[in-house]
Amino acid sequence: MKICYHCMMRIENNTGDICTNCGKPLIQQPVEARYLKPGTELHDKYVVGYPIGNGGFGNTYIGWDKVLCRKVAIKEFYPEQYISRRNDGVTVSVSTETMQPRFRRGLQQFIEEARSVASLHDIKGVVEISKFFEENGTGYIIMEYLEGMDVKTILEKSGNKKDYEWCRRVVLTVLYTLREIHKRGVLHRDIAPDNIFVTYEGVIKLIDFGAAKHASALANMKAEVVLKVGYAPIEQYSKEAPQGPYTDLYAVAALFYRMLTGQKPIPANERINNENLVTPSEMGVILPEQAEMAIMMCLNVQPKFRLQSADEFMEALDGNNFVPIYEPEWILPPVEEKKRFSTLPIGTRIGIAFASTILIAGIVVGGIFAFGNDDRKSTLVVDGRETTLADLVGKDEEEAVSELTQIGIDDYSIVYEFSEKPEGAVISQSINAGTITVDDNTNILLTVSGGDEKYSLLDYSDKSVDDIVDYFSNHNFQILDTVYPGGESVVVDSDVQSTETAKNGVINILRQYSDDTAAGLCYSQSIEPGTVCNGSEEVTFAVSCGKVSDYEIVIPDFSGKGKSKVEEMMKEAGLADYLEIEYEEGIYSDQIKKGKVCDQSLSTDYVYNTLEKKAYKLVNGVRKNEQSDGKIIFWLSEGPAQEMTTESSEDEDYELQESIIYDTDL
């Protein structure tokens, strides 16, 4: 009997080298050094298969429970920045002695994670943990092996977003599970589309509690900060900030937002001083007002303004009495059943093999034939049929579509462009007129004139803000730009002099900081690409300013420096072009020499933002004491107060002597 370490199936009476179940090779293949070798046994009970996932802190394998004779998932604690696999391919060792305490602390949290999730075994919506232990110098968690797909994959297979009712049912099911988890003092802290798993039976489960911690322990433990940008609330950006059920509710609201709109919310740390998140309804999503209010409330940057419990969120979604119904039909995308080659009837297999041989021969012959004949109508058709496509340019849209339908082409796309041509006239076609081969993959794109009003909105993801401005300026839209995050919108004056009629629609350029997108590039838009617009819509494009840290300059310590040194340091720091220097006197100091800086209006815990032209303090990632007067004041020391008294006495004596001399002369 052979074992397939890809799917963990036992293969009996198989003399081949391919698994009849999954079609992968039975011959063992090498794996990277970080992974256990397939076939390794753990705890004398669990057989390790090939890896099915990894992250910065661990490896996940498919496995086999020899006692219960079932598949399992095996999670191994493997923080690759601290450890490596020894030559035996099994045990691990910490890279340096100084890393040992950190590794042990991480391993303790890993085991604690397993213990906290294992205690939730009676909650159907939580992945089941059956065992956790230490071995080979690290730790392992044995979990149920789930077969199905995560919500991220479902969205990818469903046009990247879903309707309100579908999203509501998913979110209510997640909240139903979180309500039970929170009652036991556990937080998930990593709710996101790839951590909501749907089994083929339709059961929705929360997975990857890698960031989960006991809420009661957060006060005394400095847990590792684990973030998913867009889904993580502001309190997760700090190791010290308190967390609670409201932390998970933020992530659930972000999940809801993503499923409805197809876009992640702007990261919380980029919305601290500018709560400008576009609502789902502003993006054209149809949903109840109360539901939208609940989503936006839970996405509030400040925890105190969010809903505080899963019950409150469920109530806002009219889900007070909601009980999950686990059915695959409503949640999973339709999957066309594919039979394995080995299970097909013998006659069918022979037919497929024969047809494949003929097909390959035909391709070779066709290639030779095509070189010998320039007549396109004589092209050998291997897969598909031949037809004649007319020149559709200049024809009316309806007429063009009718002609495509008549020759059997039902798969076509239409986009509209501003044009001087009559509205509805075809401007171009993606496949030139003539004899063409049509098969199931044939798609024709027709570009149709929208006249002076109708157009199809392009996808501006990763496009330059200049591209956006140029396009909409050419077509005479009003364009407003915030210039920097949180700034007031100003009208963009373009050099382009458009001859088109002025549009009623407004184009908003919303500048935001982003760790993921380069400065000047668009990363989201309020109206979905491909939407047909009439020129009156308000469209908002979120444009990256890059990382906020790229613009922040820490204010140096100028204590004890003279004027010339101050000005030199201001230039070196890159502040001289942004802050006007002012000097003031009148402060006495025993420590600072006369004429040297003894105090400064912007202390060293300030940073200056060169984009926003303002200074502020950062306290746990939150801005405080913003200043935008464009200057920095330095107070110069007058020296010790005693020195001042001595000088005064000497001056008084001098004046007195002068007076005496004057009287004598008289």
Image (cartoon, rainbow, N blue to C red):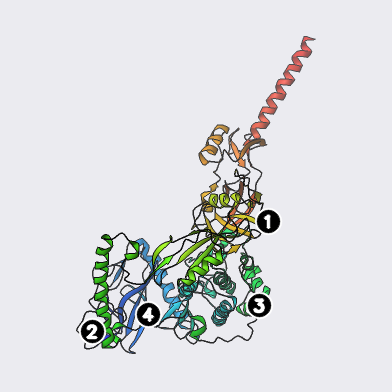
SS class, disc 4: strand
Residue that mark 3 sits on:
316
Mark 3 or 1, which is nearer the eye?
A: 1
Residue furthest to the bottom: 68
Residue 2 tag number:
2
Question: Earlier along the polypeptide chain: callout 3 or callout 1?
Answer: 3
Q: Are marks 4 and 3 in contact (CB under 8 Å)?
A: no
Foreground label between 4 and 3: 3
Nearer the camera: disc 1 or disc 4: 1
What amino acid is labelled 2 in the image?
Lys
**Sequence-earlier tag: 1 or 4:** 4
Specify the label residue 504 is tagged with: 1
Of labels 1 and 2, earlier in sequence is 2
Q: Nearer the viewer, mark 4 or mark 2?
A: 2
Element at label 2: strand
* Mark 2 neighbour class, 10 Å CA radius: few under 14, some 14 to 19, many 20 or more: some
Kind of residue at disc 3: Ala
Q: Nearer the viewer, residue 146 or 419?
A: 419
Q: CA distance from mark 1 to mark 2?
A: 70 Å
Q: At which x and y percent is residue 537?
A: 65, 60
- Residue 232 in sight here: no
Where is residue 404 shown, x and y percent of the image? 48, 68
Q: Farthest residue in the right direction?
A: 666
Q: Which badge, 4 or 3, is on the more N-terminal residue?
A: 4
